[in-house]
Each structure stands twice: as C-alpha cells, then as structure tokens.
Amino acid sequence: MDPERVLQIGKIVGVFGVNGEIKVFKMAEEPAIFDPGRRVMLREAEGWYTPYTIKTVKAHKKILRICFEEIGDRSGAENLVGAGLFIHRSALPETDADTYYWCDLIGLDVFGAAGEYIGRVTSMIATGSNDVFVVTAGNTETLVPAIGAVVRDIDLENGRMRVDLPEGL
C-alpha cells in the first residue's frame, strides 16, 4: 500500500460569518489533524490540490469552523464550498501495534479460517460498540464485526485479513 497517498479528512459544506470562516464536515476522528498551523490540501472542483494553513478551529455542533491563514473574507470562503480537505497519509500519527486506520484496511482481501476467499473490504461502518467491515464479493456483501474474536490476523504488507466468522454470517 502506498503510504504517501492523500486521504480526505473533511469537506467544506458552508461558510460562517464575514471573516472567511468555513464549515467543515470532518471525516477524521483524530482531532490533532485539524490543529492550528497544520497544512492541508483542498481539492477544488477543477481537481487540483491547493495548500492551506489552518489558523483557527472551533467545534460547532457536528461540524468544525475553520479559518485558514490564506482566506480573510466571506467571498474567499464561499469560493471553497464543496472542496474536500486532504492530507498526505504520512501526516497521520503513528498507531499502536493492533490499531489501524480505516484507509489501511479498505481494499484488503478477506479469507475465512479454512482459507476460503470471502471478498474485499470495501468500506467500514462505525456502530458505536465496534466497527464493522463491509466485505464484498460480486453481488454478495458480508458484514464482519471488527472484534478480536472474529478478526484473527491483519497483514497489511500482503493486503490480507483472516477472519473466523461466527455461525450465520
């Protein structure tokens, strides 16, 4: 897997006030990703990435209100609505040994305890109690709980996950 790929961490969904503050729907759990001084890239409608520096950030309901050093008024902020916020994968903090970022797990091939191919991780769902892998093979979708009793091994280097599915899954 390419450790230098860019990852979307948010999307600009609106503006706030007259001083260039933007409303961001965040797609990242790690709050430090949005710290003041952090450089992010905005992918604008035309498809190119432009670097911006976070000046201030405030939590506001289910979104963040962010002010960039490069934007000083509402007009400049309005031009950014719809843009995605991205960072390089290498900018993410290191994880513990048995902790993974979703972006590293999506795309893994999943095999059962007997070695049978189950499918590929195509997305993940946060349920509150534990995450769930959405594993797809053709038109078949299998929901796999992301718990130690089910997920037996994750091999990022070879792009594989081994699971022991409970009866009925």
Image (cartoon, rainbow, N blue to C red):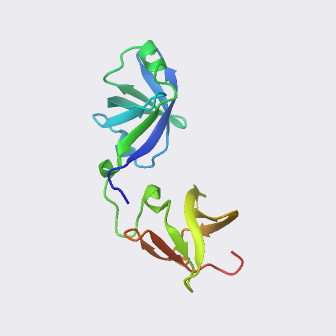
Q: Quadrant of residue 127?
A: bottom right
Q: Is residue 166 above or below residue 56?
A: below
Residue 130 in view here? no
> Would residue 46 be visible to someone looking at this image?
yes
User: Closest to the observer: 103 or 115?
Assistant: 115
Residue reaching furthest to the bottom: 114
The percent position of residue 98, horizontal first and vertical second, equals 39, 70
Quarter assignment of residue 19: top left
Classify residue 12 as left or right of residue 97. right
- Count of residue discs: 0
Taking the spot 45% from the left edge, 49% from the top edge, the residue there is: 29
In this picture, is 160 found above or below 71?
Answer: below
Q: Position of residue 75 (x, y in %)?
A: 45, 13
Q: In front: 123, or 93?
A: 123
* Residue 119 appears left or right of 140: left
Q: Is residue 12 left or right of residue 3?
A: right
Q: Residue at x 42, y 16 (%)?
A: 76
From the viewer's side, name the closer residue of 115 and 143.
115
Q: Residue at x 50, y 22 (%)?
A: 15
| Image point (35%, 45%), residue name | 32
Quarter of the image containing the N terminus?
A: bottom left
Rendered-image quadrant of the C terminus: bottom right
Give residue 65's position: percent from left, percent from top.
Answer: 45, 29
